[in-house]
Image (cartoon, grey):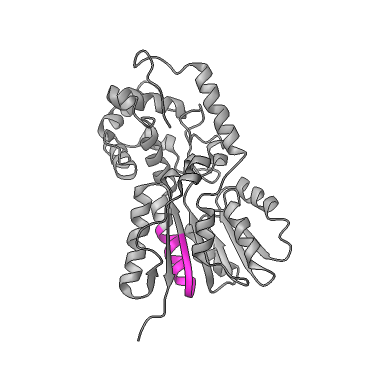
């Protein structure tokens, strides 16, 4: 998100601008717009009677479009780690009386166990939308650096012993924090930010998202503070990925979907940053090299200019689709 340069590096953001940005977040939270909806449904080639897994329900935008195409013999399995997302989806999908729908609160890393519990040995299609909605921004868990919220960044409800962003910034070593910021956020100033975090926590614990954002802003060079994106963007991304083991979950979830996918079935993945996209590209290329899969397109499908104008969050989205093929003996 763009920030305008103030009179000095130490000037706070005017309260009116903070309130305006918070209002924008509230507005976005009430109108989740599914990204690459038309392209995803088209490339998944959903047919009546298919068994489809939407591993990231969110606002049920994609799930609703899928359910419309399944018919009475179809089955939609929707998964989300967020209890509120399950309830939103339950309401959004309630009018699809003819289609069988299972809504599961859980992480898609456990897809194999979920399918086993439902006694579903094979699936026809699977969707992984790795973006996160305005609902999550408004969840009060410290995902946004524009609000002063507890520094959690967990998708599900944290319990005793749950890893949180607060744990990382207050208890992990400087080197470990720097490795997280560089590895999962590709943050060029990871060392400087980690050093500043460790210095600051010796005075008082770092408890909130705005505290952390201010520390990051102080740690980086002036030119970086007022660049195209907020200077804390990559730090928050890295912490979120680390807290939720997103890449590990993605690899495990995709592998489970592939194992349960029938021949000619398809998996679609929508990514929003290069780290996730590289993981998906690597897996898909590996399946193609082994002869068990074929990428529907070598290059990812990008949103149109019109979609980006309607929904700026779509600008970094990439859709990749792979099809399972019959292996030659």
Magenta region, residue range: 251-268
User: Relative to 326, is 204 above or below?
Assistant: above
Q: How many marks?
A: 0
Left or right of residue 244, residue 97 in this image: right
Does residue 236 appear anywhere in the picture?
A: yes
Q: 254 and 114: which one is in front?
A: 254
Does residue 201 appear anywhere in the picture?
A: no
Quadrant where the C terminus sits is bottom left
User: Relative to 58, is 299 above or below?
Assistant: below
Quadrant where the N terminus sits is top left
Residue 125, position as x, y percentages in the image: 52, 67
Residue 22, position as x, y percentages in the image: 54, 27
- Let me know if residue 167 is in the magenta part: no
Which quadrant of the structure image shows residue 242? top left
Q: Residue at x 43, y 48 (%)?
A: 317
Left or right of residue 211, residue 298 in this image: left
Q: Residue at x 56, y 44 (%)?
A: 157
Left or right of residue 326, residue 65 in this image: right
Which quadrant of the structure image shows residue 253? bottom left
Q: 193 and 233: which one is in front?
A: 233
Q: Residue at x 35, y 62 (%)?
A: 298
């Amino acid at each position: 998100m763009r920030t305008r340069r103030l009179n000095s590096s130490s000037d706070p953001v005017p309260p009116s601008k903070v309130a305006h940005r918070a209002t924008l977040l509230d507005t976005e939270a009430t109108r989740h717009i599914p990204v690459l909806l038309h392209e995803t449904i088209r490339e998944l080639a959903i047919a009546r009677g298919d068994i489809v897994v939407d591993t990231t329900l969110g606002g049920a935008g994609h799930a609703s479009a899928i359910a419309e195409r399944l018919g009475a013999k179809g089955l939609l399995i929707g998964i989300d780690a967020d209890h509120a997302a399950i309830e939103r989806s339950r309401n959004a999908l309630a009018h699809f009386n003819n289609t069988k729908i299972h809504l599961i609160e859980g992480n898609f890393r456990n897809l194999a166990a979920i399918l086993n519990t439902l006694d579903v040995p094979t699936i026809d299609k699977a969707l992984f939308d790795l973006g996160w909605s305005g609902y999550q921004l408004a969840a009060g868990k410290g995902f946004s650096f524009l609000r002063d919220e507890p520094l959690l960044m967990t998708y599900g409800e944290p319990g005793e012993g749950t890893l949180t962003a607060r744990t990382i910034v207050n208890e992990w070593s400087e080197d470990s924090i720097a490795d997280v910021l560089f590895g999962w956020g590709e943050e060029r100033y990871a060392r400087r930010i980690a050093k500043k975090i460790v210095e600051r926590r010796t005075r008082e614990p770092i408890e909130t998202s705005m505290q952390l954002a201010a520390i990051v802003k102080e740690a980086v060079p002036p030119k970086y503070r007022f660049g195209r994106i907020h200077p804390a963007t990559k730090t928050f991304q890295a912490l979120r990925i680390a807290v939720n083991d997103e890449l590990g979950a993605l690899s495990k979830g995709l592998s489970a979907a592939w194992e349960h996918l029938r021949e000619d079935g398809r998996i679609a993945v929508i990514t929003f940053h290069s780290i996730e996209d590289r993981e998906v590209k690597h897996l898909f290329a590996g399946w193609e090299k082994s002869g068990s899969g074929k990428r529907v397109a070598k290059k990812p499908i990008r949103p149109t200019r019109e979609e980006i104008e309607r929904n700026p969050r779509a600008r970094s989205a990439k859709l990749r689709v792979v099809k399972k093929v019959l292996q030659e003996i």
